[in-house]
Structures are given as C-alpha cells and as structure tokens.
Amino acid sequence: MGGRGLGVLMIIMLFMAITSTGSAECIAVSSLVAYDVYRAYINKNATGKQILFVSRVVIVVFGILQGCLSAWLLGMGVGIGWVYTFMGTLCGSAVPPIAALLTHNGINATGALAGSVIGMIGALVSWIIYAGAVNDGEVSLATLGQLKPCLAGNMVALGLSSIVMFLVSAMSPQNFDWKVYSEKIKLVDEVKVDVPDWEMSDEFLDSAKAWIWKWGMGSSGFLIIVWPALCLPWGVFPKAVYNLWASIAFMWGWVASMMIVSLPIWENRKTIMAVLTCSPIKKEAKKGEVEVAGA
C-alpha cells in the first residue's frame, strides 16, 4: 500500500513538473513571437491588445504542436527518458551563447549564432558516432538513448559552442553598450512598470551579477569538478563508502527541497497574509530609496 501511494505521489509530481515546464515553454515562445517577430518585423507600432492577441494565438498553436509531437514520439516508442537525455545534445549548444550575451559585452551576434549551430552539429555527430562505437556499430533508438552517448553529445555541445563563439567574437568584439536596454527599448503603450528605482540601478544589477557568478559558477564547479575528483581515490566504492556517498546525496536533496519550498513562502509571507486577511500590502521603503529621497 505504501509503495502504491508513493507511486501515485511520484506520478503527481511528474505531472506537475511537466505541465509547469510546458506552461513556461508556451509563455516563452509566445513572448518571442509576439515581441521579437510580430512587433519587431510585422507591426512595429503594435498595441498592447494586439500583442496580447498574438500571444494567445501562439500559445494555442504551440500547445497543439506540443501534443502532436508527443503523440508522434510515443508512436515511435520514444519515451520521456530518451527525450530528456537527448535534449542537451540538441539544445545545449545554445546555453553558452545565451549566458555570454547576458554577461559579456564582447560577444557578437555572428559568434553567438555560429557557436549555437556548429556546436549543435558537432554534438549530433559525436552523439551518433559514440553510440555506434560502443555498441559494435549499432545505431538505434536504444543505443542512442544510452547515457554515455548522450553525455558525449552534451559535452561537445557545451564545449564546441563555447570555443567557436569566443573565437569568432574575438575577431570583431562587439563592445555592446548595456545602456541600450534602458534608453532605446520602448514599452508597449508607454505603460509604466511598477519596479522600484533601486532595483533598476546599475549598482544593484552589478551586485546581482557578481552574486550569480560567485555562487552559480562556484557551486557548478564544485559539483562538476571538485566533488567527482574527491571520489576518484576511492575507485570502486566499498559498501560503507557508498552508503556515506548516498547519505550525503539524500541530505543534499532534502535540504534543497526544504529550501525550494520554504523560501518562496517566507519571501512572500506579507502578500500571503494580505490575501488571507483581505488587507492591503504595506510597502516598506528600501535603504536605497531612503538615501535617494534624502539626497
């Protein structure tokens, strides 16, 4: 009974994860089409209602396409596990250009596009070659879905994309001026965004960027390089060492789960209480706002 109950909870968790991911994909695609295609090239003076209408149409169309693609893959015998492991091979080459475009002013459009396309081609080639090499030349859905061929494709996607992007961009650095975002981007219908000035200041954004680089890159480096390297001296884990390693992994998961669940609730406690008590939210002045007002 306990096993069946846990299975139901697992199915519910997977359903919620998949639906939330699909919702985010629909919103992302609709925003790209509405703002970067429709407003940029079709109707440069589009109103908020027109953009909203285009977004809704795209969401419906993209949702139908998602369902058709899922049915097609299921008919081919391709499960979600296969798609999950293959996803990095197909899309991983876009990760370094996107990250660099947001943090490095020297990356140009040619370098970003070249890195994405060449990285994807190299990843697909290495994925197929590796699958055939370790399976006596057999290339099929079963061999292509194995972890090692997908790992090879993922690594080539990330590495080759980064190399190509930086080499091409180094030939003609863009030296992008970040002020373009605040000076030349026009709001729809001139709607004022309700964002405190201190959150849009260069000092706040620079500190957020430094925090991301410090903890994001630091934790990634630890998990990808340092932690596996520390396990190398043990070789094949004895039972006691494996129990220790598994215990640390479980504790990491539990702590992460508690943080993921509790932090959003704590950070939005005032909003939650305002909704439960039907009272208005009291806005507190931030330190930066007080200093600006005093100045």
Image (cartoon, grey):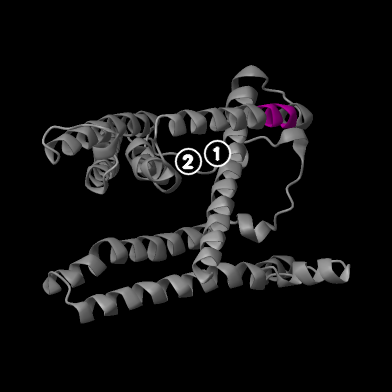
Q: Residue, x 54% and y 43% (percent of image)?
A: 179
- The amino acid marked with disc number 2 is Asp
Q: Residue, x 70% and y 37% (percent of image)?
A: 187
- The amino acid marked with disc number 1 is Val
Q: Quadrant of the C terminus?
A: bottom right
Q: Which residues are magenta?
A: 52-57
Mark number, residue 117? none
Coordinates of residue 110 in the picture (x, y in percent): 35, 28
Taking depth in this image into account, of 275 and 112 the one nearest to the observer is: 275
Coordinates of residue 194 in the picture (x, y in percent): 74, 52
Contact, mark 2 vs mark 1 (Cβ under 8 Å): yes
Q: Secondary structure at mark 2?
A: loop
Coordinates of residue 166 in the picture (x, y in percent): 28, 39
Q: Residue, x 44% and y 62% (percent of image)?
A: 210
Q: Quadrant of the N terminus?
A: bottom right
Quadrant of residue 175 within the rendered picture: top left
Taking depth in this image into account, of 229 and 213 the one nearest to the observer is: 229
Q: Is residue 285 left or right of residue 245?
A: right
Residue under numbered circle 1: 180
State the residue lying farthest toward the top: 42
Coordinates of residue 86 in the picture (x, y in percent): 34, 40
Residue under numbered circle 2: 177
Residue 295 in sight in this render: no
Packing grade of label 1 (10 A; few <14, some 14-19, many >=20) is: few
